[in-house]
Image: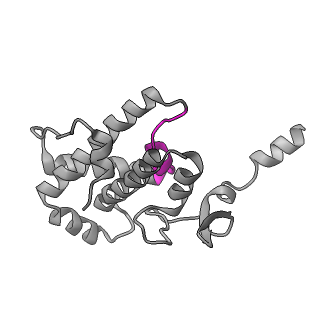
């Protein structure tokens, strides 16, 4: 029994890490386990495939699924501010081109998502939000904090986020 457990613990991490589509269903594959920072979005819906698999498998409630997909799109937009896959000049150009209004909108969505997740986690058992699963590597987590710092650079100390009375709907109904 201990030998089986030890073998399981020594399995490559990427065995369970990625997904591909087979007639619309998600299948976990071993081949594409190593993904770039922004991940792979094979169906071009704005949500990283491994994150989409997580949402689909863990949440049956349509509202939590929609919230999860929206969270993935918001996080992707945030990562675009600080991505290391672009050349440093291109990343800096993207940052400089982002308007204060767009930065404020993104910040509002991030805060609304945080408020929504906090409310939902109080009423739902085993719901911890989405952030921990989206930023699931050290590189992604570091980039997340870098992007937050860039938002702060654009918005400054005096910015106060605007969150509606229905933060979950604010997140689900957003469009860039």
Q: Position of residue 25 (x, y in %)?
A: 62, 65
Q: Nearer the viewer, residue 167 or 102?
A: 167
6 displayed left or right of 13: right
Q: Tell which residue pokes out farthest to the top in this image.
A: 122
Is residue 127 on the magenta stretch? yes
Q: Tell which residue pokes out farthest to the left in this image.
A: 158
169 displayed left or right of 5: left
- Colour approach in the figure: one colour
Rendered residue at 17%/62% (across/down): 98
Rendered residue at 28%/59% (across/down): 81
**Up-down relation of residue 84 to residue 140 (above or below):** below
Please state, as top left, top right, bottom left or bottom right, where the C terminus lies in the image.
bottom left
Q: Position of residue 10 (x, y in %)?
A: 76, 49
Q: Nearer the viewer, residue 13 or 57?
A: 57
35 displayed left or right of 12: left
Rendered residue at 79%/47% (across/down): 8
Is residue 175 on the magenta stretch? no
Q: Where is residue 17, by image quadrant? A: bottom right
Please state, as top left, top right, bottom left or bottom right, where the N terminus lies in the image.
top right
Q: Which residues are magenta?
A: 126-139
Q: Position of residue 154 (x, y in %)?
A: 15, 51
Q: Nearer the viewer, residue 81 or 121?
A: 121
């Amino acid at each position: 029994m201990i030998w089986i457990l030890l073998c399981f613990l020594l399995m490559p991490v990427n065995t369970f890490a990625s997904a591909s589509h087979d007639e619309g269903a998600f299948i976990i594959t071993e081949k594409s386990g190593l993904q770039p920072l922004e991940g792979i979005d094979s169906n071009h819906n704005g949500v990283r495939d491994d994150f989409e698999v997580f949402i689909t498998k863990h949440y049956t409630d349509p509202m939590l699924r929609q919230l999860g997909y929206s969270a993935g799109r918001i996080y992707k937009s945030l990562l675009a501010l600080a991505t290391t896959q672009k050349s440093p000049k291109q990343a800096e150009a993207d940052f400089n081109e982002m308007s204060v209004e767009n930065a404020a909108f993104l910040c509002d969505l991030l805060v609304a998502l945080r408020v929504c997740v906090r409310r939902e986690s109080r009423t739902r058992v085993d719901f911890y939000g989405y952030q921990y699963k989206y930023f699931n590597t050290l590189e992604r987590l570091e980039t997340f904090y870098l992007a937050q710092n860039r938002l702060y650079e654009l918005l400054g100390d005096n910015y106060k986020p605007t969150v509606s009375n229905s933060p979950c709907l604010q997140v689900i109904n957003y469009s860039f």
